[in-house]
Image: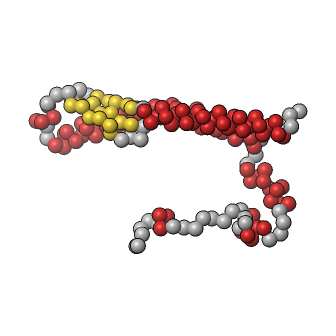
Amino acid sequence: MTSLQEQLQSAMAELAEHTERIQEVQKELGRARASATSKDRMVTATVSAHGEITDLKFHTEDYRDMPSAQLAAVLMATVNEARAAMSAQVGGKVRPLMRQQDSLADGMFGGSSVEDLLAPLRAMRPRGLADTVLGDGGRPPKPARTYEDEEEFDG
């Protein structure tokens, strides 16, 4: 039987590995690009992992003779196709991390919620502590609201 300290060390090592993998994926996605070319091969749009357009290349001069609404539709469709390709790429990188995170949490907390694990410790806390440090109900107090939380700031 492994000791609690050994279990904790193992969980911390797994957490460190998971954190390292997340950082690697963040770097990969920071460099990632996805492109799409319009059906008429007039334009290619390239986007970043954030969906930002990083490049538009016109392969022909046909856009000069197009009505603006038609050009807008071609551009939007091409950019949206590039964004969909990037979304699939991001999902392929992030989904495994999420599954690993769920597995890691189950391993660390034995499938129990954090609240269930902390309940015995909360029951042992001295009287009065809930009102000062832990706030109402033994939980940390909510942070103060700032103007950034408001929909509008009337400054």
Q: Is residue 88 above or below residue 105?
A: above
Query: In the image, is 95 to the left or to the right of 4?
Result: left
- The quadrant of the rendering that contains the C terminus is bottom left
Residue at horizontal 74 percent and vertical 41 percent from the top? 108
**Residue 73 percent across, percent down from the top left:** 24, 40
- The reply to whether residue 66 is in sight is yes
Residue at the outermost left position: 65
Q: Is residue 12 above or below residue 114?
A: above
**Residue 10 percent across, percent down from the top left:** 76, 34
The quadrant in which residue 141 appears is bottom right
Residue at horizontal 44 percent and vertical 65 percent from the top? 151
**Residue 89 percent across, percent down from the top left:** 46, 31
Residue at horizontal 10 percent and vertical 36 percent from the top? 65
- The quadrant of the rendering that contains the N terminus is top right
**Residue 38 percent across, percent down from the top left:** 26, 30
Q: How is the image coloured?
A: secondary structure
Q: Nearer the viewer, residue 67 or 127?
A: 127
Q: Nearer the viewer, residue 14 or 87?
A: 14
Residue at the outermost bottom position: 154
Counting every numbered tag in the picture gives: 0
The quadrant in which residue 99 appears is top right
Query: In the image, is 135 to the left or to the right of 146?
Result: right
